[in-house]
Image: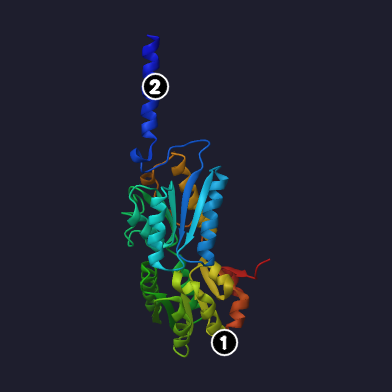
């Protein structure tokens, strides 16, 4: 009887060991107290919002006590690079991929249907083909979207109602699916206010300054969505806005701080942190990827940059404090 009990116990241990292998569970990584996880980070481009999201993601894992070796890769806004990065992560057999921005998420999902993928800074996860729905994302991918339903509306209404702009320019990369979705929304919002949207498309960062200059004399204000290509070269747009006194508005707070008049947004650090909490649950085996719905930002606010407004020839009205808060610069 004693030997039989030992045999049963050994069989049970072998069964558990088999269940803990990656081959048998491609939705979660079984918890191990002393394990150091390999986490691949694919960030599409270097700019403040994506940088903040990556930092937030890592901070969440640290706060949750997860031991991780981070392999951070930046595609430098080149979609070909996202594919190479994702394929390398699969070859390295990482435990989880953090995909920061839509192109990185698409590349990761194309590279693996087994390794858990957590995305962030994705505007339209369903339209991009990343998830079936926000509530039921799919087998090995979920994350956070930066498309708060009221964010763009708040900014566009501020431009039309408070700044009284009738012709609004927008610069975006038509090759970025997230940007196309945003521009369609902006056009609808602008036309509802009896204003006109003047669209200029670019394919790379070297074209951004010329695109901004092409709007001079044609628009009363410029709006930049959360477009990775344009935001990477945002300084050139800010330069045109200042020299030609055209108020510039953007789709997120980090770019607003660089020199745009206003943005309705949220903290990308917090958004990345939300994604990191998802990753912690997956790595410790508490949840499967398919059990975690895609999450929206948990907060939203309109912020007005007084210094940028002055530089771009716009008079700041104190009553705007009733609509949002003023940004006075970093402390």
Residue at figure coordinates x 54%, y 73% from the top left: 262
Residue at figure coordinates x 42%, y 50% from the top left: 92
* Quarter of the N terminus within the rendering: top left
Q: Position of residue 29 (x, y in %)?
A: 42, 41
Question: Which residue position holds label 1?
Answer: 243
Using the rendered view, name the quadrant where residue 177 is placed. Answer: bottom left
* Quarter of the C terminus within the rendering: bottom right
Q: Position of residue 209 (x, y in %)?
A: 48, 82
**283 above or below 167?**
above
Mark 1 vs 2, N-terminal side: 2
Could you tell me if residue 160 is visible in this image? Answer: no
User: Residue at the right extreme?
Assistant: 331
Give the foreground label among 1 and 2: 2
Q: Position of residue 253 (x, y in %)?
A: 54, 67
Q: Secondary structure at mark 1?
A: helix
Residue 43 numbered tag: none
Q: Is residue 44 left or right of residue 311?
A: left
Q: Secondary structure at mark 2?
A: helix
Question: Which residue position holds label 2?
Answer: 10
């Amino acid at each position: 009887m004693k030997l039989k009990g030992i045999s049963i116990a050994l069989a049970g241990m072998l069964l558990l060991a088999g269940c803990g292998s990656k081959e048998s569970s491609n939705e979660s990584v079984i918890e191990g107290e002393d394990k150091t996880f390999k986490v691949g980070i694919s960030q599409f481009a270097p700019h403040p919002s994506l940088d903040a999201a990556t930092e937030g993601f890592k901070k969440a894992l640290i706060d949750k006590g997860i031991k991780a070796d981070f392999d951070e890769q930046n595609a430098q806004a080149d979609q070909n690079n996202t594919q190479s990065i994702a394929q390398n992560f699969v070859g390295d057999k990482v435990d989880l991929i953090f995909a920061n921005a839509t192109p990185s998420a698409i590349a990761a999902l194309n590279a693996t249907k087994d390794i858990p993928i957590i995305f962030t800074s994705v505007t339209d996860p369903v339209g991009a083909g990343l998830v079936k729905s926000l509530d039921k994302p799919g087998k090995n991918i979920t994350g956070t979207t930066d498309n708060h339903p009221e964010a763009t509306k708040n900014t566009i209404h501020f431009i039309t109602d408070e700044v009284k702009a009738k012709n609004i320019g927008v610069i975006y990369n038509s090759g970025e699916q997230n940007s196309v979705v945003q521009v369609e929304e902006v056009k609808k919002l602008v036309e509802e206010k009896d204003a006109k949207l003047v669209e200029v498309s670019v394919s790379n960062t070297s074209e951004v300054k010329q695109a901004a200059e092409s709007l001079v004399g044609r628009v009363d204000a410029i709006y930049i969505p959360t477009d990775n290509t344009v935001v990477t070269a945002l300084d050139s747009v800010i330069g045109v806005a200042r020299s030609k006194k055209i108020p510039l508005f953007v789709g997120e707070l980090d770019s607003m701080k660089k020199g745009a008049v206003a943005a309705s947004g949220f903290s990308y650090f917090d958004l990345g942190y939300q994604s990191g909490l998802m990753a912690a649950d997956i790595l410790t085996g508490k949840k499967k990827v398919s059990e975690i719905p895609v999450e929206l930002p948990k907060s939203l606010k309109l912020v007005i940059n007084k210094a940028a407004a002055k530089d771009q020839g716009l008079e700041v009205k104190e009553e705007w404090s009733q609509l949002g808060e003023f940004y006075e610069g970093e402390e």
